[in-house]
Image (spheres, rainbow, N blue to C red):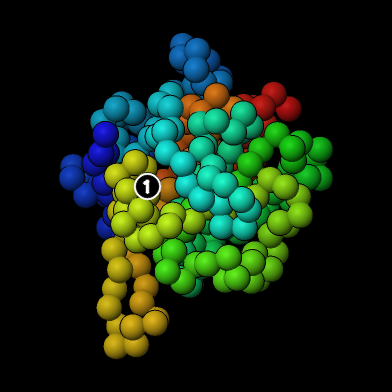
Amino acid sequence: MRRRTFLGGAGVAATTGLSGCLGAVGLGGGNPDVTLSEPDREYDSADLPYPAWGERVPDVRVSAALADGPVAVRELQTASFVTFFYSHCRTVCPVLVAALRNLQARAAQSGYGDRVTFLPTTFDPARDDAERLRAYAAEMNVDLSAGNWEFLRPASRDRAETVVTDAFGVTFERTEPENMDQYMFAHAALTLLVNADGYVERAYRTKSPAEDELAADLETVIGV
């Protein structure tokens, strides 16, 4: 089912102007599918334009740019962080990817790197091919050898819209500069923490996720 969508540039939902806070509030909450309690917010998960607390992530498979075969987030059997980016971005995306990179390093140092997977998903497959994403990983100091980081790359722009916009509710809008190779995107900032059963524990709708909050939520979810 197609979700309502939102744009990050305006900071509100495209259809209803949603602005509910999605911060953590502790354990409990009465939902057997998740560990973290329901966040303090104005809207229920079903009314939000993206998968949110207690909802299962969409049943979609996306090609892994640097590995064989597709990835289905709900079938990973590890906790995962999913975000949406393009490698030519110079504003929001490096911050989102750096937050996950720092978490990757923290997980390795703390001994639970094998219990979490990082899945930044590009919506610019035309430029974000395997060669470009390897270079981007080196630029961002991502440890591809750790075995817990996969760049997901829809096969085409249409497929990117199906996955990123239709399934995950995140709108991206291409700009058209004079140099057509230098186009950019207006897009949302969204990071999802998904548990090993494929349910969303937290949806962080921020351009600069707080590393300590992400790590604390992850450690609670995996029982560290």
Q: Is residue 47 visible?
A: yes
Q: Amino acid at mark 1?
A: Val
Q: How many marks?
A: 1
Nearest the eye: 28 or 117? 117
> Residue 113's x, y, as percent?
74, 41
User: Residue at image x 29%, y 73%?
Assistant: 175
User: In this image, 2 relative to 164: left or right?
Assistant: left
Nearest the eye: 144 or 51? 144
Please say if 182 is above or below 71. below
Q: Secondary structure at mark 1?
A: helix
User: Residue at image x 48%, y 27%?
Assistant: 199
The residue that disc 1 covers is 163
Nearest the eye: 215 or 81? 81
User: Residue at image x 60%, y 70%?
Assistant: 131
Q: Is residue 19 visible?
A: no
Please say if 172 is above or below 74. below
> Residue 163's x, y, as percent?
37, 47
Nearest the eye: 140 or 74? 74
Q: Residue furthest bottom?
A: 178
Image quarter (top left, top right, bottom left or bottom right) of the C terminus = top right
To which quarter of the image does residue 123 belong?
bottom left
> Residue 161's x, y, as percent?
32, 53
To which quarter of the image does residue 1 belong?
top left
